[in-house]
Amino acid sequence: MYTKCGSIEDARNVFDNMAVRDVVSWTVMIEGYAESGHIEDAFGIFAMMREGGIQAGKVTYMHVLNACASSADLKSGREVHSEVERAGFGSDLLVSTALIHMYAKCGAVKDARRVFDSMSERDVVSWSAMIGGYAEAGCGEEAFEIFHQMKLQGVEPDRVTYINILNVCVNPGVLDLGKEIHSEVVEAGLASHIPLGNALINMYAKCGSIEGACQVFDGMSRRDVITWNAMIGGYAQHGCAREAVNLFERMLEERVRPNSVTFVGVLSACSRAGFVTEGRQFFTSSLRDHGIVPTMELYGCMVDLLGRAGQLEEAEQLINDMPLEATASIWSSLLGACRIHGN
């Protein structure tokens, strides 16, 4: 209860006061730490569990592998994989799927594929994990290969599968494939799923079809902040600055709370169109009115906007006044603007 409510310290107090703990108690504590981002604590509890002579179960290994995935800790992941094999869980469907996910998140997509190929049975989650691994690694052809194999074997794709394969369709050369998958999503009755709609907007925008992105956005009965961000970012990417600004203002009217990604999108649009006054207002408002935590990307967009407009002294002053230490890319942006303006 405490871990699910986000109160990990209270969960730990209960755990520490237990006179007797079984494998479920240890596993729940590991899961709580892993899901709340306390990865080192999750590993610590797992080590204590082993030192106490408690044999981990397959669910325990799943959560430890998820912790390895979250921290991209390939070394620990390989060690846990060895333990899994010794414990006799190497052929378990759920554990094998967790291994695929871990290896993919750690950038070891070949290891993920080896686990996948060794599985005697696979469900939609394991197929989706392998497709997602290839998508993250930029291996589009391999992702499509697995997607087609999955359908040939009669496994019905789910929402996660479609989101993963849509993430591969992000260049103009595969727009037709993206449209086919969109049709499948509609036929499967999944078009109302918000994350899927977001993935479709992103796919169309990155494939150069801002009209397709608009149609998906307008057809969504429910939207979250990611939906708005994807559409604003799509407009910015295509140089439709006025549309991006108008959509941002509509977002505020509909009382959707923007985040830093929202402001990066709208500032990028302003930068490309030279909307300096509006860009200044949005930047100031992000920090003052919306409580956005300053990020390097946010400041980078503002420096780019000022630099493109020739406001070089203001851009330099902004860099000097930043609460963050300027990166090479921030200075490079200003330097590029100086070169363009002959200053």
Image (cartoon, rainbow, N blue to C red):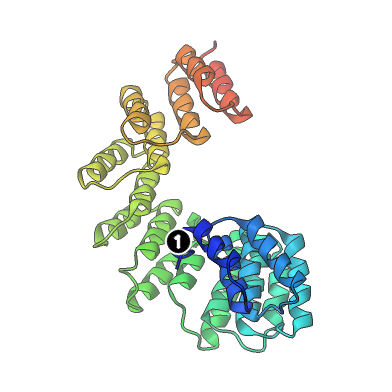
Query: SS at mark 1?
Result: helix
Residue type highlighted by circle 1: Leu
Residue beneath the point at 43% across and 72% down:
159
On screen, residue 72 versus residue 29, left or right, reads right
Q: Is residue 203 above or below residue 296?
A: below
Residue beneath the point at 53% across and 77% down:
125
Residue placed most toward the observer, 253 or 151 = 253
Residue on which the image places disc 1:
175
On screen, residue 15 versus residue 213, left or right, reads right
Residue beneath the point at 33% across and 50% down:
228
Q: Is residue 198 above or below residue 153?
A: above
On screen, residue 53 versus residue 57, left or right, reads right
Residue beneath the point at 48% across and 19% down:
318
Please indicate, yes or no, whether residue 223 appears anywhere in the rendered image.
yes
On screen, residue 279 versus residue 131, left or right, reads left
Residue placed most toward the observer, 305 or 285 = 285
Image coordinates for residue 311, horizontal then vertical, percent: 44, 15
Image coordinates for residue 229, horizontal then vertical, percent: 37, 48
* Res 333 quadrant in image: top right
* Res 335 quadrant in image: top right
Quadrant containing the N terminus in the rendered view: bottom left
Quadrant containing the C terminus in the rendered view: top right
